[in-house]
Image (cartoon, rainbow, N blue to C red):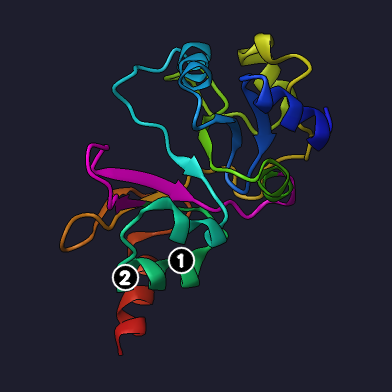
Amino acid sequence: MTITLAVQALTQGEVVAFPTDTVYGLGCDSASADAVTRLYSLKRRPPDKALPLLVLRDWLPGMGLQLSDSARRAINAFWPGPLTLVLPIDAPDSVPTVAVREPNHPVALELLRAWGHPLASSSANLSGRGECLSAEEVLRQLPELAGRVLPGGPPPSGAASTILDLASDPWRLLREGTLSEARIGAALETADD
């Protein structure tokens, strides 16, 4: 599959798989309820588990997110990279927070630039099963994605992203992945000095 074909599939409400800097991921049009439902169904993921958005940092000002000084410091220190940020949303009648990440992988970044919008995303595996580190592993777990997997070799880290909740005060680490709590804390504290 090429980037052009991946964008066509996304436009048609399909789910595509692609390498990121952590593990292989799934993505779909975040603005399409049908596409998001399709991603949940494909993964067999419980619908009460929210999907993070893959973004480019330039898109954040137009997304209605509250970007605190801590959020800006975390973005400057670790994006693009394996850090997912949970941020409050500045919009009435919406969910209170959203998780966002800018991946540091050329294929994922090229797809985001070509698509031009946030992608609802999750790891490319069946819910509860191990993450996939190759296109072949993705197709073994999710054969329905045949023809909709972007190649790109094994992800550099092979570990999940770290999830940092900046909607709470003080910030909380929800999942330690590639980046440790100590490293994040040190970066945020150093930036305060």
Q: Position of residue 71 (x, y in %)?
A: 35, 66
Q: Quadrant of residue 193?
A: bottom left
Q: Amino acid at mark 2?
A: Ser
Residue at the location (30% across, 68% down)?
A: 68
User: Nearer the N terminus, badge 1 or badge 2?
Assistant: 2
Residue at the location (40% across, 70% down)?
A: 72
Residue at the location (33% across, 61% down)?
A: 181
Q: Nearer the viewer, residue 18 or 66?
A: 66
Question: Which residue is disc 2 drawn over?
Answer: 70
Magenta span: 86-107
Examine the rendering and report whether any part of residue 136 can be seen. yes
Q: Residues within 10 Å of mark 2 (few under 14, many from 20)?
A: some
The disc placed on residue 75 is: 1
Look at the image and tell me in which quarter the N terminus lies: top right
Q: Position of residue 147 (x, y in %)?
A: 79, 17
Q: Nearer the viewer, residue 98 or 19?
A: 98
Residue at the location (66% across, 50% down)?
A: 156
